[in-house]
Image (cartoon, rainbow, N blue to C red):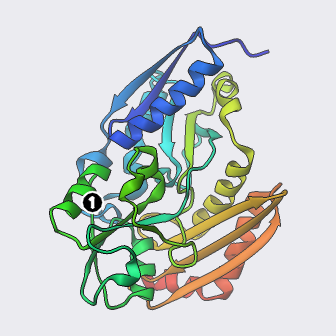
Amino acid sequence: MTTTPERIVIATRESRLAMWQAVHVQGLLQSLYPACQVELMGMTTRGDQILDRPLAKVGGKGLFVKELETALLERSADIAVHSMKDVPMTLEPEFALVAIGPREVPLDAFISNKFARIEDLPPGAVVGTSSLRREAQLRAMYPYLAVTSLRGNLDTRLRKLDEGQYDAIILAAAGLKRLGLAERIRSTLSAESSLPAAGQGALGIEALADRPEVAAWVAPLNDMATAACVRAERAVSRALAGSCEVPLGAYGEYADGTLRLRGLVATPDGTRIARAEHAGPASDPEALGLALVADLRAQGANEILAALG
């Protein structure tokens, strides 16, 4: 029988969105264990410090989790809270994802001070995005737009838009909604026009693999449907060497024990895109992910990935 925790320390990045996520988990744990002292340990990661270059050029997703994982190893923190789309597809063996919470809207959002929809943008309009996945899909559907890189935390990206550096920007809808900025969303891009990243909109909790008591503490926060979707999505991304350097989308939807999984891999300029869809029982999400990968390979994913290499 697992003992009730007396103290839980949560490692988190210090960006406004990361702090919202950590405070959210803190509140849930406090409700579960009213006598427990749940504390936050705010940290600045390399990903937060390097703002002048695209993530793909400086090390990818791991830049946002390394310092938090060090705190876990040193046992100065018990858990780390992450946006699942920032978590590397393969964790070091010392670490485990011990819970994945319910998902916020996983779709991409169109934000603009001048236009209501992406279809309203004129030729040459400047659209900012931090994601090769979004960039590839935008270039494929709207080749007349000028798609450029956009770095910085969410507030910084919105400020750059407001300063007139961009005609529009594309962000994850989840972050805007969580920070009470839903009114900035002019429209939401459908999964057909902008397939989300693996894990987008979901929160993950990481702990040391050799601390089963910590896994037991946070087990009630796990959402089975979301976890199945995210595990399938991550299996796709992992098998195709998914990182910030590969324009890759994977999106699962759960209904009545069945998972519908869609995936794509593309060249950054959007001229070549392999797409596939697979459905099956949610009981083995990784197997479903690998079945989708086989479909993507049949659609030319290997050639696309080879061209990226």
Q: How many neighbours does mark 1 have within 10 angstroms: few (below 14), some (14-19), or many (20 or more)? A: some
Q: Which residue is drawn at 30% across and 65% down?
A: 57
Total marks shown come to 1
Q: In this view, does 222 lie above or below 301?
A: above
Identify the residue under disc 1.
Answer: 151
Residue closer to the observer: 292 or 34: 34
Q: In this view, does 206 lie above or below 231?
A: above
What quarter of the picture does the C terminus occupy?
A: bottom left
Q: Which residue is drawn at 46% across and 74% down?
A: 247
Q: Residue at x 61, y 82 (%)?
A: 275
Residue closer to the observer: 218 or 154: 154
Q: In this view, does 224 lie above or below 109?
A: above
What quarter of the picture does the N terminus occupy?
A: top right
Q: Can residue 232 be seen in this view?
A: yes
* Quarter location, residue 5: top right
The image position of residue 267, as x and y in percent, is 44, 83
Q: Which residue is drawn at 69% across and 60% down?
A: 232
Q: Can residue 52 be seen in this view?
A: no
Q: Is mark 1 on a helix, strand or loop?
A: loop
The image position of residue 170, as x and y in percent, is 37, 67
The image position of residue 169, as x and y in percent, is 32, 68
Residue 84 located left or right of residue 267 = right
The image position of residue 176, as x and y in percent, is 41, 52
The amino acid at mark 1 is Arg
* Quarter location, residue 250: bottom right
Residue 113 located left or right of residue 192 = left
Q: Is residue 284 above or below residue 218?
A: below
